[in-house]
Image: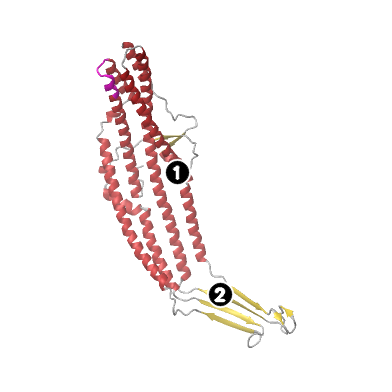
């Protein structure tokens, strides 16, 4: 039995190699990921085109209406039996040029509306960036701590596999019972199934990271987490009121709702101006079709606002203002609830992690050595040994989950406040 225990001690001291260790692996921390995101994310690039399109509307609004040139010529003279004659003796033609002049400041109001449209497009871009950046950070933290949990599975699977090999040898010589081998096999099957599930989840997360950062599908990634300032406490340094003020000042979706109100107010001014008719001035010349011959005339055209005074568009603009005011109130309520919920969640996650003994995450090899020592000295049975081993795995995975939730809640604080409180 001493030889068996010595063999177990040797085999359990072997650690599994890192499955992501490749020479061409992209080592990525969160700062680098955010730089790639800002440079390569296609959703942001596409939204940029919308901003440029909105800016083009300003150019259109600044343009004046083109003058209109009208010309009419005699097609066929039945007396001379000739086409398109223009001479004074046997021809006839008439021409005019006209220009539309917009009144009531319609052009300036159109420019103002287009400029507000650019602000809306820019705020939509920033709100998309805020949302995608939070998604990037959350996915990064989830992937990083999933990778840390994967190491636990790799180490435990490697050690359990070696233990199974040793027990199979001892089973053949009759030193141990079959039930012990079955117990180890069951544990190994469960570990591999859980590892496969975690690998699938991790691969999905890496897919999302590659998409957000514009990386090729086959790019292997190893995530690195920078040192975290654990002393930056929510309860002592950051108050809920400060977070709420930050959100009200920085949230792009709230700014978007307020700018939408400005857009509708500008649109109402424009629609009221549209009710005022424009005038069209024209200058015409007629060779012989008018009196006197070689007639030159000055024309003025103005519609009479008798029936259509743009009532429908004015009403729609007023409704748009009412809807925008309601949208602002709704957005403010959403903001307050999101900040409150995120603040409470972050505090709860901070406290949960602080209540854990920091010595719990001590070196893995020391724990294994202690377990094996007790197992060798027959202080614990095989079942107790495996149960303790399983308990260690579960607690380590739970610790990784708590650490992820802590980092995720901090990223969410940045998201709901529209600021960079936690770096």
Q: Is residue 405 above or below residue 168?
A: below
Residue 262 placement (x, y as % from top left): 39, 63
Left or right: 72 in relation to 272: right
- Give the side of residue 49 with respect to residue 195, left or right: right
Residue positioned 53% across, 74% down in the render? 100
Location of residue 7 by image quarter: top left
Q: Give the range drawn in magenta.
A: 377-386
Disc 1: which residue: 212
Pick the front one: 178 or 398: 178
Q: Residue 99 carries which label?
A: 2
Rendered residue at 36%/50% (across/down): 418
Q: Mark 1 packing: few (<14 Cα in 10 Å), some, or many (20+)?
A: many
Quadrant holding the C terminus: top left
Q: Which residue lies furthest to the bottom in this view?
A: 292
Nearer to us in this view, 283 or 139: 139
Task: Judge by depth and name the residue closer to the eye, 238 or 74.
Answer: 74
Is residue 225 visible in the rendered image? The answer is no
Sequence-wise first label, 1 or 2: 2
Element type where label 1 sits in the image: helix
Residue closest to the far front: 178
Residue 122 colored magenta?
no
Residue 79, image x, y percentages: 73, 85
In the rendered view, tell whether residue 167 sits above or below residue 214: above
Residue 145 visible in the displayed image:
yes
At x 56%, y 81%, the residue is: 299
Q: Mark 1 or mark 2, which is nearer to you?
A: 1
Q: Is residue 213 left or right of residue 366?
A: right
Residue 164 % position (x, y): 36, 20
Classify residue 258 by image quadrant: bottom left
| Residue at 41% in and 63% down | 263
């Amino acid at each position: 039995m001493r030889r068996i225990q010595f063999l177990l001690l040797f085999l359990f001291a072997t650690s599994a190699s890192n499955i992501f260790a490749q020479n061409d692996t992209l080592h990525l921390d969160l700062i680098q990921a955010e730089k790639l995101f800002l440079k390569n994310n296609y959703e942001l690039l596409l939204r940029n085109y919308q901003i440029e399109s909105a800016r083009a509307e300003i150019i259109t609004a600044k343009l004046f209406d083109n003058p209109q040139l009208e010309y009419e010529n005699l097609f066929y003279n039945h007396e001379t039996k000739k086409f398109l004659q223009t001479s004074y003796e046997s021809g006839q033609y008439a021409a005019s040029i006209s220009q539309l002049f917009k009144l009531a400041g319609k052009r300036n109001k159109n420019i103002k509306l287009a400029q507000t449209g650019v602000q809306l497009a820019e705020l939509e871009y920033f709100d998309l960036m805020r949302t995608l950046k939070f998604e990037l950070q959350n996915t990064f933290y989830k992937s990083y701590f999933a990778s840390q949990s994967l190491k636990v599975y790799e180490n435990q699977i490697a050690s359990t596999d070696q233990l199974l090999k040793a027990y199979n040898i001892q089973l053949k010589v009759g030193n141990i019972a079959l039930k012990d081998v079955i117990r180890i096999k069951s544990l190994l099957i469960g570990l591999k199934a859980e590892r496969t599930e975690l690998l699938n989840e991790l691969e999905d997360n890496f897919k999302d990271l590659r998409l957000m950062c514009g990386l090729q599908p086959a790019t292997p990634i190893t995530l690195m987490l920078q040192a975290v300032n654990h002393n930056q406490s929510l309860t002592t340094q950051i108050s809920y009121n400060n977070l709420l003020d930050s959100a009200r000042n920085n949230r792009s979706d709230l700014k978007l709702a307020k700018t939408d109100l400005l857009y509708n107010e500008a649109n109402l001014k424009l629609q009221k101006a549209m009710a005022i008719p424009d005038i069209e001035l024209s200058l015409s010349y007629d060779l012989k079709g008018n009196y006197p011959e070689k007639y030159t005339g000055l024309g003025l055209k103005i519609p009479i606002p008798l029936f259509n005074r743009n009532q429908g568009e004015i009403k729609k603009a007023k409704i748009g203002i009412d809807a925008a005011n309601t949208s602002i109130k709704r957005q403010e309520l959403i903001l307050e609830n999101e900040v409150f919920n995120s603040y409470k969640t972050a505090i709860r996650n901070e406290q949960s992690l602080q209540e854990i003994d920091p010595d719990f995450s001590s070196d893995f090899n020391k724990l294994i050595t202690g377990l094996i020592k007790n197992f060798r000295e027959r202080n614990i049975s095989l079942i107790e040994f495996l149960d303790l081993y399983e308990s260690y795995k579960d607690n380590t995975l739970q610790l990784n989950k708590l650490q992820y939730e802590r980092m995720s809640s901090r990223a969410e604080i940045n998201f709901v406040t529209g600021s960079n409180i936690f770096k």
